[in-house]
Image (spheres, grey):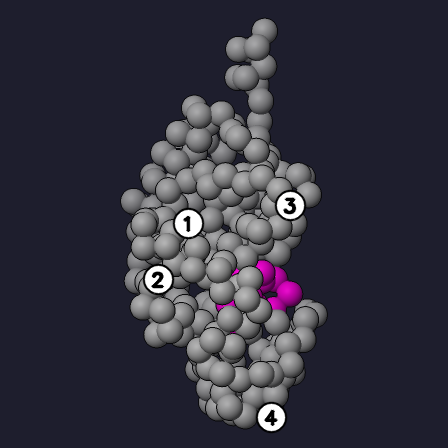
Amino acid sequence: MKEERKKVQKYKVSIVNYTNTLPFKYGMEETGFVDKIDLQYDIPSVCAQKVIEGKVDLGLIPVAVIPALKEFHIVSMYCLGSNDKVDTVKLYSTVPLNEIKEVYLDYQSRTSVSLVKVLAKFHWSIQPVFTDAKEGFEKLISGNTAAVVIGDRCFEMNGKFAYEFDLSSEWKKFTGMPFVFAAWISNKELDEDFVAGFDISLAYGVERIKEAVKKNIAPEKQELVTGYLTNRISYELDDKKQTSMEHFLHLLKQL
């Protein structure tokens, strides 16, 4: 009976529904692993909240919320990270850093809005007012008011403002390390066979980015997306990224 229950159990999994997770989604679909889970598509802040509240068992959650979990386990060797520029996590402004008085914080984000606060204090030495934003806040960028924007919306916004600060690139300038925006975190211990199968499905997609793009992205955007996923996003949660993640959480405690 125990073995039978083990086979039919479906873990609830939340994934961020951005372009940068395409290899993960493709891998789970192509290997059939998606049929073994209850997969839910969310923005990062909602994904985080679901894991914190126990509404899902596993999520691709923003690193900044890890301290809010009573129990957590890093489940996979894959993550959403970047070795330098990432292009989809930016502070947009019409004035230089030292003239910014207010920063709107993207409501979809958890890690990136924490990262901008860390950079402001320890790297840029500025003290703007940070304001939690609501939908449509991107239109408020003007004068001394800047904003942190994450995700696919950046593709349309890049190049439209006098000043753009890529937060991953700024972290690299500050620390010399890559950055981890989100990792696969569970709020309980998961079955070992499940974890092994999960990682195999993710690896399948990460190793086949061109195929994932060809199947899911319109032809006119395939070159752009392929370049973004291969040159801007770094999926392996290696030792350097884990060290960077620990350093970021250490600085976050000092805010």
The Cα atoms of the two marked residues, 1 and 4, are separated by 36 Å
Q: Which residue occupies the foreground of this view, 233 or 18? A: 233
Is 162 drawn above or below residue 252 in the view shown?
Answer: below
**Residue for point 54% across, 92% down:** 99
- From the image, state whether disc 1 or disc 3 is nearer to you: 3
First in residue order: circle 2 vs circle 1: 1
The Cα atoms of the two marked residues, 1 and 3, are separated by 18 Å
Where is residue 18? Give x, y as percent.
Answer: 50, 56
Q: Dots 2 and 1: beta carbons under 8 Å?
A: no
Kind of residue at disc 2? Pro
Q: In the rendered structure, find residue 52 and report the number of the disc placed on it.
A: 3
Q: Is residue 212 visible?
A: no
Q: In the rendered structure, find residue 79 and report the number of the disc placed on it.
A: 1
The Cα atoms of the two marked residues, 2 and 1, are separated by 12 Å
**Residue for point 47% across, 49% down:** 183
Quadrant housing the N terminus? top right
Quadrant housing the C terminus? bottom right
Kind of residue at disc 4? Gly
The Cα atoms of the two marked residues, 2 and 3, are separated by 26 Å
First in residue order: circle 4 vs circle 2: 4
Residue beneath disc 2 = 178
Q: In the rendered structure, find residue 225 and report the number of the disc placed on it.
A: none
First in residue order: circle 3 vs circle 4: 3
First in residue order: circle 2 vs circle 3: 3
Stretch in magenta = 106-116
- Quick one: label 2, few (<14), some, or many (20+) residues within 10 Å? many
Secondary structure type for disc 3: helix
**Residue for point 52% across, 77% down:** 121
Residue beneath disc 4 = 143
